[in-house]
Image (cartoon, rainbow, N blue to C red):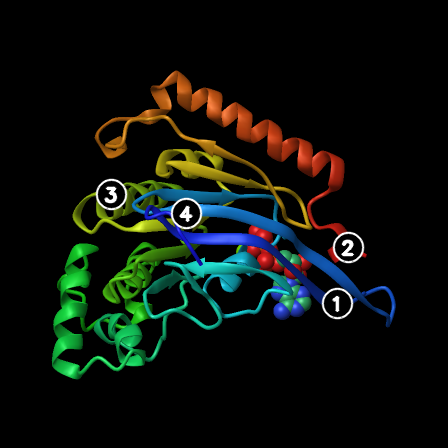
Amino acid sequence: MQTLQSQVLQVNSVRKSFTKRKTSSRKAERVEVLGGVSFDLKSGTFTSIIGPSGCGKTTLLRIIDGLLPADSGEVFFKGELVTSPPPKMGFVFQGFGLLPWRTVQKNVEFGLELRGVDESERVEIARKYIQVVGLAGFENHYVHEISGGMQQRVGLARALSIDPDVLLMDEPFASVDMQTREILQKQLLQIVKGSVPKTTLFVTHNIDEAIYLSDEIVLLTTRPGMVKEVIKVNLPQDRWNYDPRLNPEYARLRNYCWSFLEKEIMEKGVFGSDLT
Ligand SMILES: Nc1ncnc2c1ncn2[C@@H]1O[C@H](COP(=O)(O)OP(=O)(O)OP(=O)(O)O)[C@@H](O)[C@H]1O
Ligand SMILES: [Mg+2]
């Protein structure tokens, strides 16, 4: 597959259906979740995906990471067809996805263990990324001994430790409080646009979060999820140095995204046949 140098990921016409049993009857039905999704990810960019609940965002990320096969269409990562999880793709899961019986250090080492990195190197790399996310001193704490915001940073350190060429993040800040969320957003930008540059694909329900973080926003429709539009966010890069909400471009983008989501939800509902 030929790629433009700047394109690290290409998603081509990805379709996916699941068989679901209706709660109101014993019949199973085929539910189309993704209806032909296409977009590209340019190297070094931060791209968010927003779309109504249940429109297939998590399913799409799992297909991109090779954890789930598409029914049709394909994903190319650095020009190679994805058929299983690529070693250079990092994933921060919806919820924290940490192992409670492991310490912070051992959780961060987990991805490196899976990739066969030997112990002394693993320890060193994990320490480095624990430092990057501001958790130095907490290496020997267990998951239940640290706050939700700190747990989320462990998830980020684990994903960064494998030095991914693309970082996939599925609603990573959804289960932390508003203040912590804003701090984590700022820290994430400082890392992936500053100290440890990464190409990032980030799923969120939160429009403000998407605008604050992104260079581009992919708007997905209600199920079956399809790309309605890819919006460019023309705000200065160093957003952690000032409040972008004061910029008129921010207000314009916010209105635009809200109108889109409101229209999708009002016209088609959020959950579709989940409620039948
Ligand atoms: N393994 C599965 N088997 C059957 N149905 C599934 C499976 N995985 C997901 N679904 C269904 O596919 C639809 C999309 O799910 P998905 O988790 O991808 O949506 P989402 O956009 O991430 O939702 P949310 O915004 O709530 O996180 C939902 O209706 C879900 O119930
Ligand atoms: Mg999801």
Mark 1 belongs to which amino acid? Lys
Decide: few, some or many residues near mark 2? Use Cα within 10 Å; few <14, some 14-19, many ≥20: few
Disc number lying in front (1 or 4) = 4
Give the Cα distance between marks 1 and 3: 41 Å
Give the Cα distance between marks 2 and 3: 40 Å
- Look at mark 2 in the image and give the residue it sits on: 273
- Look at mark 1 in the image and give the residue it sits on: 20
Give the Cα distance between marks 2 and 4: 31 Å
Of marks 1 and 4, which one's residue comes earlier in the chain?
A: 1
Instruction: Say whether marks 2 and 3 touch (CB < 8 Å).
Output: no
Q: Is residue 13 above or below residue 162?
A: above
- Look at mark 4 in the image and give the residue it sits on: 41
Decide: few, some or many residues near mark 4? Use Cα within 10 Å; few <14, some 14-19, many ≥20: many
Of marks 1 and 2, which one's residue comes earlier in the chain?
A: 1
Q: Is residue 203 visible?
A: yes
Disc number lying in front (2 or 4) = 4
Question: If the image is split into quadrants, where does the N terminus sit?
Answer: bottom left
Quadrant of the image where one finds ligand 1: bottom right
Q: How far across and how far down the image is residue 235, in percent?
A: 34, 26
Q: How far across and how far down the image is residue 38, in percent?
A: 55, 48
Report the residue at 69% width, 50% height from top. Answer: 224
Quadrant of the image occupied by residue 161:
bottom left
Q: Is residue 13 above or below residue 163?
A: above
Identify the element where label 4 is drawn. strand
